[in-house]
Amino acid sequence: MVAFSAPQKPTYLFTNLPELESVLALLQFGEPYLSSSNGDVPWKRIPKLLQTAGIAKIPPVIKT
């Protein structure tokens, strides 16, 4: 299980990943996630290997 999380951005949680094969795909996902101002990553920018994993996109916490 791997999660990407940052302030004011949604958290992406990936499960059921093949250990060695997923390292490059996770690094490829990290680039558009970090460079996005709001953390949204279009489906077509998510590497194919990660598209076959369990994915949860959790909205950011909004302070009121």
Image (cartoon, helix red, strand yellow):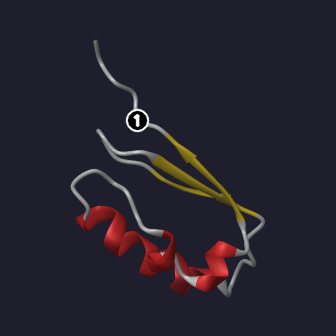
Residue 38 lies, in percent from the top left, at: 28, 50
At mark 1, the secondary structure is loop
Residue at 67%, 87% in the rendered image: 21
- For the image, the number of numbered tags is 1
**Front in this rendered view, residue 41 or 26:** 41
Q: Quadrant of residue 34?
A: bottom left
Residue at 33%, 74% in the rendered image: 31
**Front in this rendered view, residue 20 or 39:** 39
Residue 63 lies, in percent from the top left, at: 29, 18
Residue 42 lies, in percent from the top left, at: 43, 68
Q: Residues within 10 Å of mark 1 (few under 14, many from 20)?
A: some
Q: Quadrant of the C terminus?
A: top left
Q: Quadrant of residue 62?
A: top left
Amino acid type at image mark 1: Pro
**Front in this rendered view, residue 43 or 20:** 43
On the rendered structure, is 4 left or right of 36? right
Residue 13 lies, in percent from the top left, at: 60, 53
Instruction: Give the labeled residue for mark 1.
Output: 60
Q: Quadrant of the N terminus?
A: bottom right
Residue at 63%, 75% in the rendered image: 50
